[in-house]
Image: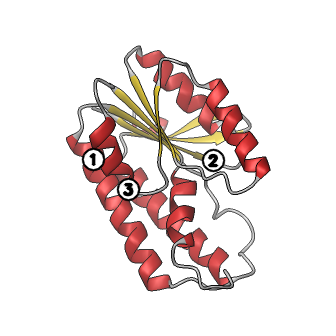
Amino acid sequence: MTSILITGGARSGKSSFAQELALSSGGPVLFVATAVAGDEEMRQRIEEHRRRRPAAWHTLEVTTGVSRHITESIGAARVVVIDCVTLLVSNIVNQFLNETGEQADAALSEKAVAGEIDELIDCIHRTHARFIVVTNEVGMGLVPANQVGRLYRDLLGKANQRLAGQADEVYLMIAGLPLRVKPSSLSS
């Protein structure tokens, strides 16, 4: 089966495009949501995302251990949408914050993120479903002002590179428009 990575900035249309691709497949869909409702505003965002998903889709809400949960819950799904790796990496890094939240154990964070991504790539390769993975491109802006922000940006960038390397297709979303990056139109 194929795997597709969709990346881009915040509010660039990544989730909507992922849903369109999943709907066009015509098969049963497992939707994997990684968001944590840490405050009221985030809870409202999660509710809005829930309302926009088709009722027939099976939704799995997990913060880490995504591949294990997919394996346990795949059922008859022919398409798996993961929305999103951005929050998955954040969930992992947050596990290694000190008591003030200003420092994270970089070595443990990197090992945990790499392990999660390795397991996800393995799951993609051994599961007979089409994977559509959503993530953010966070390395195009300013250098974060603190250690945790820089660590997070670096780990997400590495995760995105690994996922893009194994993906059959990669899209960069710009203002709601998908730009196909892999395979490039130049290679056709």
- In depth, the one of 77 and 142 nearer the eye is 77
Q: Can I make out residue 183 in this image?
A: no
Closer mark to the observer between disc 3 and disc 2: 3
Q: Are marks 3 and 1 in contact (CB under 8 Å)?
A: no
In the rendered image, which residue does mark 3 sit on?
A: 65
How far, Cα to Cα, is label 3 from label 1? 11 Å
Residue 7 on image: x %, y %: 57, 47
**Residue behind mark 2:** 8
Which residue does the image show at 37% across and 61% down from the upper left? Answer: 116
Element under label 2?
Answer: strand
Query: Which residue is the extreme one toward the left?
Result: 126
Of the residues tagged 2 and 1, which is closer to the observer?
1
Disc with the residue nearer the chain's start (3 vs 1): 3
Q: Disc 3 or 2, which lies upstream in sequence?
A: 2
Residue position for label 1? 123
Q: In this view, does 35 lie above or below 102?
A: above
Inspect the image, locate mark 3, and give the three-letter code of the amino acid beneath it: Gly
